[in-house]
Image: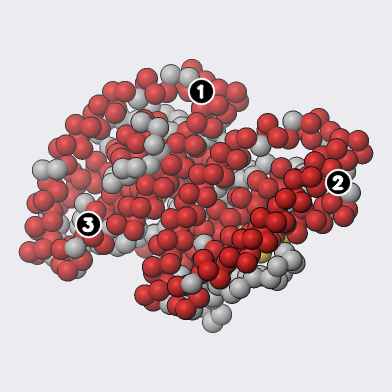
Amino acid sequence: MESAGRRPVRLVVADDLRRPRVTVLPRLLLAVPHLLWLALWTLAVLVPAPVLWLAVLARGRAPRAPHRFVAAYVRYSTHVSAYLSLVAGPYPSFTGAAGYPVDIEIDPPARQGRLGAAFRLVLAVPALMLSASLAGAPAIAGGGAALSFATGAGGVLFVVALLGWCAGLAAGRMPRGLRDVGAYAIGYAAQTTAYVLLLSDRYPSADPALVRPPLQLPAHPVRIAAGGTLERSRLTVLFRWLLATPHLLWLALWSTAVVPAAALAWLAALVSGTVPGPLFRFLAAWTRYAAHVSAFVFLVGGPFPGFVGARGSYPVDVEIDGSRRRRRVLVLVRIPAAIPALLMSTALTGTLSVVALLGWWHALVTGRMPEGIRNLGAACIRYNAQTAAYLFLLGERYPYAGPVLRAQPGDEQLSLLEDPGRAPAPSASLGEPA
């Protein structure tokens, strides 16, 4: 895996998570001047954009002056998106100057392939689709992320802003997991912008590990271990949904028994403070099985899964700590407390669908799942599993939204195994649960 420093467009996060309530409440109103200026700047970018395209076609390199102007636009739109969605706290400047808590670093002009430049808009379609699911539609630019959020069509980022606004008003602080997944969405939109506007010919990477500086990952009673290779049989990819039909039917049938089992677990935890062992094991097996099926259907995992949700039986597996005593007051409010997690889970499932679509086409052509796409899919599945476990009283910790895939040594939140024969990749992590 490549490091963040080797990419020409890099996301840098230096935010302290503090959100003064006085700026949280009227955030959209405070952002109006920036949205107006961003709209004007977006129109202005249409002038140098054809110049960049013709220059790359003719000389294989973008001129410095137009490159600087468009790069400043990408940074500014990133700052506005971060401020509007509460991913960052301070009021941004109007110039796109470097140094904002959620910032984009863009390298100077470098040589680019003429053929790739000629078909740039066509080649960018997959990245634009993923960017739209993360940062909103249209997310042609970082500015698209800000404008689409303002209209309520912001994908994962819109949910981040909605939940962050509530958390900021209540606690004066942005939950770290929400901040990190929002920063990741904005960063991917910025990569896509830079690629479309010919600031770089490096294709946007969806790998959540490409964030600077390396971030920490919290401990959690529900963890995901993603192993196996990235190779995918074209035949099984082509008929993936047909092959998954027995699992989808069995999962639906099993789910009818999960609802009364969860109700019994809730009543037992209210009375005794613990979930009985048989109920705990039954609900944990369903959670693991649902993750196995999701991994297979969405191409995050390769082989055909088993039907019992056995621990360690699938390369993309969920590990769940044993049953412990539950605080009754938290059990009583578990369902309403889970509503924010369910909103985020729904948004991430939309992103997971785009991951499956792009991975399906790529695997059909190359016989391999892109590593960044696979990693993002694993993070989405982890969050869905943690949400189910939280609802079923399998753990007390709230689901963690940060899309982190590389844990520091000794951190067991996510263990992502490399393909056999490959050297271990550098690690990255993200902080506390959201």
Place residue 176 in its image quadrant.
top right
Q: Amino acid at mark 3?
A: Leu
Left of 287 or right of it: where is 165? left
Residue visible at 58% across and 65% down in the picture: 245
Whether residue 108 is visible here, answered yes or no, is no
* Label 2 sits on residue: 275
Q: Amino acid at mark 2?
A: Val
- Compared with 247, 274 (above or below) is above
- Residue located beneath label 3 in the image: 121
**Image position, residue 136 (x, y; %):** 38, 42
Left or right, 434 with respect to 180, comes to right
Residue hosting label 1: 20
Circle number at residue 199: none
Disc 3 versus disc 1: nearer the observer: 3
Looking at the image, tell me whether mark 3 or mark 1 is earlier in sequence order: 1
- Dot 3 lies on which element? helix
Q: Taking 293 as reference, is 126 left or right? A: left
Alpha-carbon span between mark 2 and mark 1: 40 Å
Q: Mark 1 or mark 2, which is nearer the start of the sequence?
A: 1
The amino acid type, in three-letter code, at marker 1 is Pro
Q: 43 or 48, which lies in front?
A: 43
Labels 3 & 1 near each other (Cβ < 8 A): no
**Residue plotted at (36% across, 31% down):** 151
Disc 3 versus disc 1: distance between alpha carbons?
A: 41 Å
Q: How would you rate the neighbour count of disc 3 (Cα within 10 Å): few for under 14, some for 14-19, many for 20 or more?
A: few
Which residue is more in the foreground, 42 or 342?
342
Say which residue appears at 91% left-offset and 35% top-offset.
Answer: 271
